Structure formats: structure tokens, C-alpha cells
Image (cartoon, helix red, strand yellow):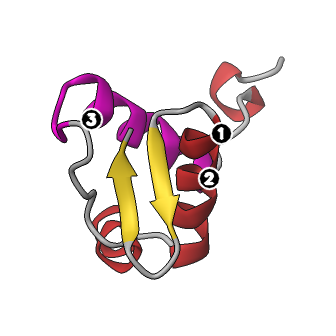
Amino acid sequence: MMDNVSSRKPELPSARVLTELRRRLDAGEWEKDQALPPVADLAAEYGVARGTVARALKQLEEEGLVRVVPRWGTFRA
């Protein structure tokens, strides 16, 4: 008999961060053109590597939700 819990795939850290950031954006936590926290701060907050946060932000940028400006930060679109 297969256990339902063990048959589920764990959520990838980047997917978890993406979901949480999308939720925060949808909730209006940041206004248009407002900077999001730095990647290092978000990584520490979520307990993941900076690259994981960067991948999530890249996806949000592709969706048009944020603008990533090299050396300046990430801003609400």
C-alpha cells in the first residue's frame, strides 16, 4: 500500500519563495516602483541561498511583476 504523504513530491525552495513573494506582491506589500528587500535579506528570511531568491525574482520579472535593475535592486513593476 502506498502512503499518500510519501508519494507527494516536496516543493522546491525556489517554488516556495516564488509563491511567497507573489503572495506578498498581490497583497500590496510593496507599491509601484518601491524597492523590495535585497536578495541577501530575502535569502536569510526564507532560509535559502541567494541564487534561489534570484531565480524566483527572475521569474517574477518575466511575469512583469517586478523590475530587476542590476546593482540597484528589484522594484515593484
Mark drawn on residue 6: none
Nearest the viewer among 11 and 77 is 77
Alpha-carbon neighbours of circle 1 within 10 Å: few (<14), some, or many (≥20)? few
Task: Tell me the residue that label 3 is attached to.
Answer: 24
Q: Distance between the residues labelled 2 and 1?
A: 6 Å
Q: Using the rendered image of the protein, determine whether residue 11 is visible from the camera's viewpoint.
A: no
Taking the spot 27% from the left edge, 35% from the top edge, the residue there is 24
Taking the spot 71% from the left edge, 29% from the top edge, the residue there is 8
Magenta stretch encompasses residue 32: no
State the image coordinates of residue 55 (x, y, percent, origin top left). 63, 58
Judge whether 66 appears above or below 24 on screen.
Answer: below
Image-based side of 8 in relation to 26, left or right? right
Q: How far apart are marks 3 and 1 (CA)?
A: 17 Å
| Magenta residues (range) | 13-31
The C terminus - image quarter: top left
Comparing marks 2 and 3, which lies closer to the viewer?
A: 2
Secondary structure, mark 1, is helix
